Image: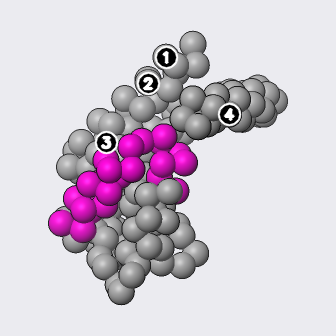
Amino acid sequence: MLGLAHYAARGVLEHVLAQHGTTFQQQIALRAAVTAEAPQTPEELVAQVRGSLKADPADIRATLDELKARELLVEDGAHLRPTEAGRELLATLAATTAPLSARVWSGIPKEDLAVAGRVLALVTERADAELAALTA
């Protein structure tokens, strides 16, 4: 059920992203750049996105190149920083998905969400440990 719920929710997000010519991985990388406290190097962004998506570093670097080509990220010395267009796109995506997410999550008791959050945190921790063991 966990996997089905993930893919159902992601399907909604992917539909919105496609309307803006953006992939899931691009959105995750752009969000990482926009929400960073300070500009990050490309390798710092690769590490952050890899921690979230468990994606291949080469694929993440290609995604950063795509974001630069779209002028959503720009090189600033050794760092990458989001452009105003990148910030605007992320804000637009958030505004578009907010009412959809609200409808998906509405009516679920806070207690149930808290339990689900604890279970998902534990599953994430265990899966991260298993992946680390597999790739060591």
In 3D space, how far apart are the residues under numbered discs 2 and 1 (Cα atoms)?
5 Å
Residue 85: give x, y in percent of width and height. Answer: 28, 71
Q: Is residue 131 above or below residue 99?
A: above
Labels 4 and 2: the sequence-earlier one: 2
Q: Which residue is mark 3?
A: 16
Residue 36 visible somewhere in the drawing: yes
The answer to which of 104 and 48 lies nearer the viewer is 48
- Crowd band around label 2 with a 10 angstrom C-alpha radius: few (<14), some (14–19), many (20+): few
What type is the residue that disc 4 sits on? Ala
The answer to which of 38 and 99 lies nearer the viewer is 38
Labels 3 and 2: the sequence-earlier one: 2
In 3D space, how far apart are the residues under numbered discs 1 and 3 (Cα atoms)?
19 Å
- Crowd band around label 4 with a 10 angstrom C-alpha radius: few (<14), some (14–19), many (20+): few
Q: Is residue 92 magenta?
A: no
Where is residue 14, by image quadrant? top left
Element class at badge 2: helix
Labels 3 and 4: the sequence-earlier one: 3
What type is the residue that disc 2 sits on? Tyr
- Residue 112, labelled with which disc? none
- Residue 129, labelled with which disc? 4
In 3D space, how far apart are the residues under numbered discs 4 and 2 (Cα atoms)?
23 Å
What type is the residue that disc 3 sits on? Val
In 3D space, how far apart are the residues under numbered discs 3 and 2 (Cα atoms)?
14 Å
Q: Which residue is mark 1?
A: 4
Element class at badge 4: helix
Residue drawn at x 39%, y 61% as measured from the top left: 30
Where is residue 114, by image quadrant? top right
Q: Which residue is mark 2?
A: 7
Figure quadrant of the N terminus:
top right
What span is in magenta? 48-69
